[in-house]
Every structure is written in structure tokens, then in C-alpha cells.
Image (tube, rainbow, N blue to C red):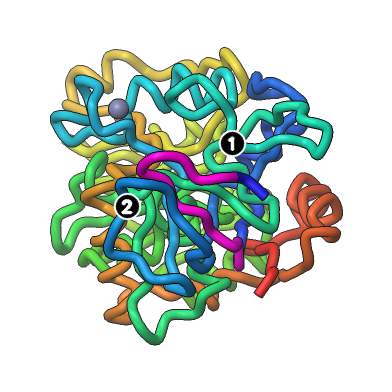
Amino acid sequence: MPEPGHGEVLLRVAGCGVCHTDLHVMKGEVAFPTPGVLGHEISGTVAGWGPGVDGLTEGDEVVCSFIIPCATCVHCVRGRDDLCIEFFAQNRVNGTMYDGRTRIYRPDGQPLAMYSMGGLAEYAVVPANNVFRLPDGLPLVDSSILGCAVFTAYGAVRNAADLQYGQTVAVYATGGVGSNVIQVARALGAAQIIAVDVRDEQLRAAQQLGATDTVNAATEDVTARVLELTDGRGVDIAFEARGLPETFVRASEAVADGGRLVAVGIAEWRATAPIEITRLVRRSIRIIGSYGARTRTDMPAVLQLAREGAITTSQVITRRGSLHDAPQLYSDLDGGRIVGRAVIDQA
Ligand SMILES: [Zn+2]
Ligand SMILES: [Zn+2]
């Protein structure tokens, strides 16, 4: 049972999303210390808190984002929680909180690294500035995915792409994050949303979430098809949500003059992709990276979209399991056998 320190909240975890980023760590494609506890997309109920925390009641239903802002570094001070120096330097490198210590230990006292809050567990400790009360009427377990899949999609669409009402969009890879990019783009007024994936069932799911057109990259010439669907213009914004050099290049080819390529998918360490320079220059095309979103300002916005029914969590979730099923769910995610999102359900 982890103990909340000053400014921290103890949560009984209800839902934890099964995310590709955890898988990257498990497979050694992203460096992270071991032994550690993964799981960074959680919802839960308040079970206690440390000194300096007020306004919470035991049993409050809450969600957390995967980016825990320190609130004091140069980036956090100007509202860029997505760039928090402490988060990357301490949590993502050492698996600790910002006093250099973890909050999770084995019964014999051995420290365990925590990936974000270490949410694949019965309890988690989270700083109070990353604890957001769930609006009434939203499902507790399913709302866990608001904290990474939806949060990341919101950051990509709202902050990086700066989507304007009526613009056209293509989403390359429509899994956990991609399917939510579709939802958020629809909610924020995209006129046309082209879903690109290699699995037909994933494309059918994308249509239900608001994709207006679908392209199967395994059987069709993706770039030719996207250009055809946009009368030869290409899309105002192409989102790359897979993190593969090949997909990155394909997405860049579909961007209209003056448009943006937004990269959301984490690639293997040091992967690169060749992009046509002259077209980029002449046609004023921008390439923008987007990691997560700005916790303190964007989590309330994400919760508002969910509260209004502009986005759904339950429709994206297609698999559920207990904590003991986690290895199987991650292995199914690795094998491409999960449509949308799977969650660990401990409610
Ligand atoms: Zn994630
Ligand atoms: Zn910071």
C-alpha cells in the first residue's frame, strides 16, 4: 500500500488502459529501469491523501493524465505541462517522483520504478494537481482512457494541429490513440475524416466513431486514394499515430498545400523517415510532433467533451480483463488483436 506524501493523493485504481507505450517499455524499445510498475492511464476512487491536499472526499471518482506536471519548471510555468522537465528527467528516466524517490515498494522494501503513477496495481499515489474529479454520469472504469488515449488525441488535434472548423483530416493507424483522434477531430468540427489502417475491423470501428471515409493500407494505394477522396488536394492535417517510418512518409504525402503533418505515434528508438524537402518548402508544409497534452488545462477540456457526450469512452473499449489478465492483453495488443482499447477493470 503506497503512502501519499505532501500534496499527494492515494487512489484505489478502478480502470487502467492497456497502452502501446507500456508495451514499448516491456519490449525494451523504450528504456526504463526495472523492476517497475507500468500502467499510466487510470481512473479510481480517492482512498486518502497527504498533508497540503484539500477539497477531496474519500470515495470521490477521479481520473489522472499520464503526464504529471511538476508545476515549477520553465515549461510548466508557461503552461506547457507536456514538456515538463522533471517528468521526463525523473519519472521517465528513473521511474521516480520529483523528490527522487518512488512511492512503490515490495513488501521486503525493495523500491519499484513507477511509470507515471504505476497504475497496473490496486493502489496508486498521484500528485493532487493530476487528480481530476469525474463529472457525474461518466463510467468510472472506462473513463480511465481519458488520461492517455483521449488526452493525447486532444493534444494532437487541439494544440499541435490547431484544427479549424471545416478542415479535412486523415488519421494513419486508428488504434487506441488514432481512434480518439477521429472522435476529437469530429467533436472539434473536422469536415472530412479519412481513417487509414490495415485492419478492416479497425476501419469499421473508426467509421462508428466519425470517420467519413476509410482506406485499407494493406490492399489500396493509400496516397492515391486519399488524394482521390479530397479531389486531388490532400488533407489539411494528416495524423501519424503508428510511429513507423513507412506510415510517416505516406502521411506526409497526403498533406495539402499549407497543411500539417502531426506525429503522435512513438517510434522505435532513433527511427528516421525520409521526407521530400522541396515540396515541404514550396508548399509550406509543417511537421509537428505532439506528445500528450497540457495536463492542467487540457484534462478539464477532455472531461468537458466527455460530459457533453461529444466523445465516448465505452465505444472505444472492446476488451476488459482483471489485473491477472494484463500479460495476455498486452500480448494481444502486440499481436494486433485488440480493436480500439483494452482496459484492466478492478471495479
Ligand atoms: Zn498511453
Ligand atoms: Zn514541470
Locate residue 84, reporting x and y percent: 33, 27
In the displayed structure, 247 sits above or below 42; it is above
Name the residue at the front extreme: 51
Q: Amino acid at mark 1?
A: Arg
Locate residue 263, reporting x and y percent: 41, 34
Mark 1, residue position: 103
Q: Amino acid at mark 2?
A: Val
Residue drawn at (61%, 58%) of the image:
16
In the displayed structure, 69 sits above or below 157; it is above
Q: Is residue 266 left or right of residue 185?
A: right
Asked whether 262 or 69 is in front, the reply is 69
Ligand 1, seen in the image, is in the quarter at top right
Q: Is residue 42 left or right of residue 321?
A: left
Q: Which residues are magenta?
A: 3-14
Q: Is residue 108 left or right of residue 72?
A: right
The secondary element bearing badge 2 is classed as loop
Locate residue 296, reporting x and y percent: 25, 48
Mark 1–mark 2 distance (CA, rounded to whole Å): 17 Å
Whether residue 55 appears in magenta in the rendering, the answer is no
Whether residue 11 appears in magenta in the rendering, the answer is yes
Asked whether 215 or 126 is in front, the reply is 126
The quarter of the picture where the C terminus appears is: bottom right
Residue drawn at (35%, 30%) of the image:
289
Residue drawn at (36%, 43%) of the image:
7
Name the front one of labels 1 and 2. 2
Q: Which numbered disc covers residue 27?
A: none
Asked whether 124 or 153 is in front, the reply is 124
